[in-house]
Amino acid sequence: MMYTSFDDFFTVLGNNQRVKILQFLNQEGPKGVSDISTKLKIEQSAVSHCMKKLLQCHFVEVKRVGKERIYSINEDTMKPLFELIRKHVEKYCVNGCVHWE
Amino acid sequence: MMYTSFDDFFTVLGNNQRVKILQFLNQEGPKGVSDISTKLKIEQSAVSHCMKKLLQCHFVEVKRVGKERIYSINEDTMKPLFELIRKHVEKYCVNGCVHWE
DNA sequence: TCTTCATATGATGTATACTTCATTTGACGA
DNA sequence: TCGTCAAATGAAGTATACATCATATGAAGA
């Protein structure tokens, strides 16, 4: 998969696990793969696959610390993004469920 | 598909056609299904399917005008959302292509 | 009420991406 | 340099959502 445009960014966000990981990093701060895997109950290799895509889109950054790779969200983009969606959900999502029609 | 939470919103945005439609409506203003179908070269029924999901997430609104149904974006959410992503792409997407590694 | 236009719906094949497993890489300490 | 831990990679089966077709609905005018 190439990441060449606007739409690709949403494609990468269009996956619950990746969004959960981003939210987790947003709330808990920088974390290694094992931590993410344990806390969110996602397989280690699945987390790795997720992190790769998130990295490619610059939604997260990574730094090596010993054997671990510590991931942190790109706050410039992700914080306001989550805030925007949070407001939207708050406005339209009633009783834990979007209502329509 | 149910739309019960935060992640579902990204799932609906995670599709190029739906994003293209949103961008089109953002730039060109309210439009009917036929217009969208013709301009973006997407089948009529595909557009309809897209609009249904976009409606369910309140990314667009609709009003009947005669036989037509005119769709317009939810500006409160979509304008700032697009602006946010635009800045992100501008920052990290070099020469029409995200670079990494 | 019949016809036509605009759009929506439902079903099904097909494409896409996710999950999982096995394996590899890379760093650290003994 | 060997063993171990942390994470990444690749491949393959499986699940998911998309594209398309045929059909239905609903409004407007003749």
Image (tube, coloured by chain):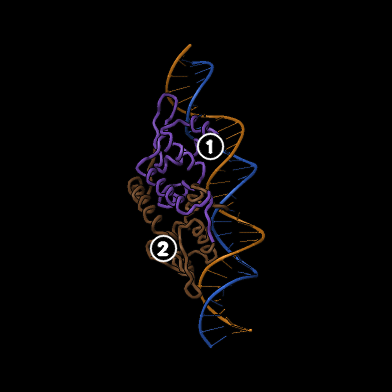
Chain colours: A brown, B purple, C blue, D orange
Where residue A31 sits, quadrant-wise, is bottom left
The percent coordinates of residue B79 (x first, y second) are: 38, 43
* Disc on res. A52: none
The percent coordinates of residue B25 (x first, y second) are: 43, 36
Name the residue furthest front.
B95
Q: The residue under label 1 is which amino acid type?
A: Ala
Q: Is residue C11 left or right of residue B88?
A: right
Residue drawn at 42 percent across, 39 percent down: B55
The percent coordinates of residue A70 (x first, y second) are: 46, 68
Q: As rendered, which of B72 and D25 lies closer to the eye?
A: B72
Chain letter of the residue beneath label 1 in the structure image: B
Q: As rendered, which of A43 and B25 lies closer to the eye?
A: B25
Task: Name the mark nearer the viewer: 1 or 2.
Answer: 2
Residue drawn at 48 percent across, 31 percent down: B33
Residue drawn at 46 percent across, 63 percent down: A61
Q: Is residue C10 above or below residue B99?
A: above
Quadrant location, the C terminus of chain A: top left
Tag 1 residue? B46
Q: Are marks 1 and 2 on the same chain?
A: no
